[in-house]
Amino acid sequence: MTTYYSEEHEWLTVEGETAVVGITQHAADQLGEIVFVEQKEVGDDFEKGDDIGVIESVKAASEIYAAVDGEVTEVNGTLEENPGALNDSPEGDAWIYKIKLTNIDQLEELMDLDGYKAFIG
Amino acid sequence: MTDAPKRTPLYDLHVELGGKMVDFAGWEMPVQYPMGIMGEHNHTRTKAGLFDVSHMGQVILRGEGAAEKLETLVPSAMTTLKEGKARYTFFTNPDGGIMDDLIVANAGDHLFLVVNASMRHQDIPHMADNLDGIEVTEIFDRALVAVQGPVAENVVGDLCSAARDMTFMQTMVADINGVECRISRLGYTGEDGFEISIPEDKAIEVCRAFLAHEDCEPVGLGARDSLRLESGLCLYGNDIDNSTSPVEASLTWAMQKRRREEGGFPGADRIQRDLAEGTAKKLVGIRPTGRAPARAGVEVQDLDGNIIGSITSGGFGPTVGAPVAMGYVATKHSEPGQKINLIIRGKAQPAEIAALPFVTQNYKR
């Protein structure tokens, strides 16, 4: 398992051709208290850069952008009832999607943890 | 605006308290403190919050007949405003729209006004140009803070016992910690509370005294917005502006009978016509059925897909525990309980017209 990070503050923990996807603690902290998450459905496919969901905080609405091409294989349904979990454990229980990667080479364009830490300064 | 944002007399205190500073209407203001918007909102509803509102314009009108002359610019009764009382009103334009909303207090030998931060550059010359023989003085050397919430009476009363006896919309000058302040029992959160004008060099000291109360915490602009929204209070620039008449905005209550009948303020023709004939659209409360907040600009449709209005303010209401919004809809759709759809990111989301306020106002009458 390897975890990658995007400049849009998402993390992907990859195992083979699948990945668990979420937002980073840094992103959650910046968004403020999260009150609503709009997610795609199982079977939806998307390309890198697509808008694959929306996170609404007490402050504003923010899009979730796909870091890679893929297809949704599982949606974390607990976020609908408990969006605040994204503030508490965005890199743990409050993952957003499980996806199937359709262009594995794109992972090379993402950052590792050290790179991401440097990115957010 | 290319100018660097201005700082209020409380800037250093905000930074010390961990305030997250943002540019708001040309002012560097705390949007939240470490407690967070939701926590600050709930703290204000249950205990007491301290807000810096020094970015708002404090203005003194002095001169013979100031109240009478001010009536030529606003549709509320000013000549009957008793000494020691304050009143909510708005400047109207010749088309009957709202140029800004404000509070006017009768301070005895002068009128004390508080206008919106974003509009002070407009309001001061507007008054100076139109109030003949009246001295219009903008105050730059005083902070303005609000202490709001059910425990506000104790927070302020512990330092100034006379404040306990004040009722809603009363105003007076009194010492707090040995500092002469103007204290008014009002605010913009829907809760009981006070707005206090403090000499700038004593502002941090007085605020520290408020914060020394165990139930008083600093609150930023984020929670100020969700508090006023839940309480059904209009935000100038969002819910009311130069195009909306006070009748459309359901602010008829702020125009006393004599003024409505006699007119004599800018746009009286349209406002009197709106009063007599009703208006095509009306400001209402809106409750989304689901959890998605509907923010300003969201289109409102009837169940047949016809556009009937739009949201002007919206977000999550922490006390309500659900999204809340305000907006204008066609008057025939404005009855509470009517089902509507909100077009959020291209999808119709069910919602309902709701009575305002969403949360019972809790003033000390």
Image (cartoon, coloured by chain):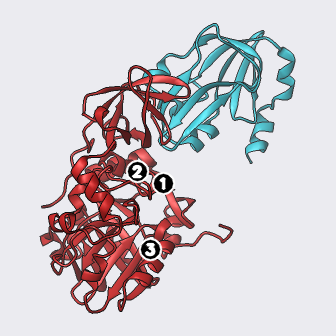
Q: Is residue B296 above or below residue A95?
A: below
Query: Which numbered disc, 1 or 2, marks the residue closer to the eye?
Result: 2
Residue type indicated by callout 1: Gln
- Element on which disc 2 rests: loop
The label on residue B123 is 3
Where does label 1 land, which residue? B32
Q: Are marks 2 and 3 in contact (CB under 8 Å)?
A: no
- Give whichever of discs 3 and 1 has the lower sequence position: 1
Q: Which chain is cyan?
A: A
The amino acid type, in three-letter code, at marker 3 is Asp
Residue B184: x %, y % from top left: 25, 72
Q: Which of the pair A16/B99 is nearer the observer?
A: B99
The percent coordinates of residue B251 (x first, y second) are: 27, 55
Q: CA distance from mark 3 to mark 1?
A: 28 Å
Quadrant (top left/top right/bottom left/bottom right) for the C terminus of chain B: bottom left
Pick the residue in front: B229 or B33.
B229
Bin the neighbour count of mark 2 within 10 Å (Cα to Cα): few under 14, some 14-19, many 20 and up.
some
Residue at left offset 45%, top offset 29%: B292
Q: Quadrant of residue B146?
A: bottom left
Could you tell me which quadrant the N terminus of chain B lies in?
bottom right
Measuring from the top left, give residue B258's x and y in whole percent: 16, 68
Chain of the residue under label 3: B
* Measured Cα–Cα span from mark 2 to mark 3: 19 Å
- Are callouts 2 and 3 both on one chain? yes
Q: Which residue is mark 2?
A: B239
Mark in the foreground, 3 or 1: 3
Do labels 3 and 1 touch, CB within 8 Å? no
